Image (cartoon, rainbow, N blue to C red):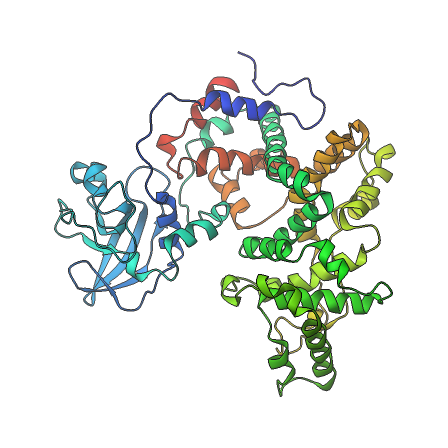
Amino acid sequence: MGSPVNSTHDYFSDAYLRFYRLYTQTGVNEPEEPPVPEKVIRCVWNDQLFKTPNLKTTDGQTLEVVFPGYWNFGSGPDFKSAAIRVDGKLLEGDVELHVFGSDWTAHGHSNNNEYDNVVLHVFMWKGRGKRKLSTREESKEPEPKLSRPHIHELELKKYLKRGILKLNEELDFESYPTLHSFNYGLCHRPLSRLPQEKLLELLNAAGDARIHTKMDRFHDRVITKGYEQTFYEGVAEAMGYPSNKLPFRMLAENVPLAELRDTIPIRASEEKRTEIIQAVLFGVSGLIDFNEIAENENLLPAERIFFGRMAKHWEQRRERWEDRLMSPREWKFGKMRPANFPYRRIAALSHLLVRHWENGLFADYLDILQSTVSNSGETGYTKATRNRLTQFFCVEAADYWSRHYTPGGKPLKQNQQLVGPDRSREVVVNIAIPIGLIYARASKSVPLEQALRSLFQIKNRPADNKWIRFMKHYILGNEEHMLKPLTSDQQTQGLMQIYQDYCTKNENNCLRCKFPGLVERYFS
C-alpha cells in the first residue's frame, strides 16, 4: 500500500491529519473519565508539586521523598528506581500512581509480578465514585487493601500546593516528561528501518499538521477579535512559554490593544509610550507595586526616578483596569533562568508594541513577508532575508530591564537582550506562521502562502530545548542517520506533532500506542 501522506497540495498539506484521524479511530466505549487525567498525577509527582515536609503515609508514618524516580514509558510502575524514607528507614524501589486508591485493584496490579518492586502507592483520592470528591471530603468507601504489605501509601490531596483542577489547567503537558528516560520508545526500531526519504516525508507531513492544529487554536479568535489583537495575544503567550503562557495570555486579554492605544497621548515620544505601556502591563499583572519599589533604598537615583515615573503613569490609568488586576501568585519563577523572568518578557512586549505602533505588529510582519514573495519560490530565502524574518521579534533595548532581572535587583555587568534569536524563531513558528496562513487563505493569496511555506522550510540550526532533546533520544535514538532529516522547523515541528499525537495521548505507555505498528504497515 502506498504512503498515506502523499498529497497533491503544494503548501501546508493536511494529509498527516487525515492519516492520523483515519488510523486512530476506534469503536471502544471508554469508561467514565476520572476527575483529572492520571498524567496530571504523574506530573505532580515528577515535579514534587506538593508540600514535602510533614508527609504522612495513610497509616500515619512519616514519609520523605529522597528521589521521585524515573518516568517509566513501558508497562509496570509509573516511576522506577525511587528512594523514600518511612519513619527514618530508607527504602528503594518503584512508585505507582493513580487517581483513586482503589485503582490498584481495579487495574489488576495485585496479581502482576511487574509490581513486586513497588514501595509506594500514591493516589489523589482514596475511593472511586461517580461524584468527584472535594478536597474537604473523605471517601466513605473502605480503604483499598493491597496484596503486598510492604507497600506504603500516600494520599496526595491534602498536601497539594494548589488545587488539583488548577494544576490540571496550568501544567504544560508539552514539557513532560522531562529527560529521565533510560530506554527508547517502541517506535524507534521501525522508524530506524525507514529509508531517509520516507522518514523525511513523514516528518514533513506531521510538521504541516502541527501548523494546522495551531491555526485551529487561533481561527475563532481572529474572527471575534481581529488579526492584530489575536497576534498580540499570541506573541504575549509565546513570551511566557513554557511556565507563564496562561498568565501572559490573560494579561494581553485584560489589556487589549485598542484600550492601550486610547490611554497613550497621540504625540507621546517612543520612550514615553514604552514607559506607559510597561506601567499598565506591570500594574495589571500585579507583579510590581510601583509605590513600594520607588521607596527601595537600594535603588540608584536614576532608577528611583524611573520607577517614580512608572508609578505616576499607572496611578493616572489604574481606574480603567481596576476590575482586571491579576495576582502575583499567578506568575511562576521556579525552574527558570532569571533572563526569562516575566518582568523582562513584559518589558520586551512593550518594546515590540512601540516599535510597530504606527501600523501594528501583525501588519508589519505581513509587510515583510509580502516583500519577500518574489524571492521565496524554489530558491528559498537568502540568509539576510531569513534572519530578517526569523529575528523579527528580537528585542535589544538599553533600558532598566536590559540590565536587571528583577525590580530593585542587582544591576547586571552588561546589557542583555530581552528576547534573543531562539525565542524569536519560536514566536515565528508558533504564532506568525499559523496566523499568517489564516490570513493568506482568507485573502486567497497563494504567493503569501508560498512565502510562509518557504519560511517554514528554511534550512536552519535545529531548534533545541529539553523536550526536543528528549524526543530525539526517545523516538529517534539520537542516531545520526535519523537526526539528519531535522534540517528545518518543519521537521522538528513534525517530531513534536508525532509525540503529541501518540506519546502524550497514550500517557507515554508504548504498549497502548498504535504508532509503531502504523509505521511498519504504512511507511516501510
Return the x and y of residue 431 as percentages of the image width and height. Answer: 67, 44
When the figure is inspected, residue 271 is found, relative to residue 186, above or below; the finding is below
**Does 18 sit left or right of 422 as displayed?**
left
**Residue 38 appears in the rendering:** yes
Residue 441 position within the rendered picture, expressed as x and y whole percent measured from the top left: 73, 29
x and y percentages locating residue 269 in the rendered image: 85, 67
Residue at image x 55%, y 38%?
Answer: 496
Give the vertical position of 343 relative to 8 (above or below). Answer: below
The residue at the point 80 percent across, 45 percent down is 363
Image vertical order of residue 167 relative to residue 5, above or below: below
Residue 503 horizontal side relative to residue 407, left or right: left
User: What is the residue that sits farthest to the top in this orientation?
Assistant: 1
Residue at 72 percent across and 54 percent down: it is: 257
Query: What residue is at 56 percent from the left and 13 percent from the top?
Result: 2
Q: Nearer the viewer, residue 446 or 130?
A: 130
How many dots with numbers? 0
Q: Image check: 13 left or right of 454?
A: left
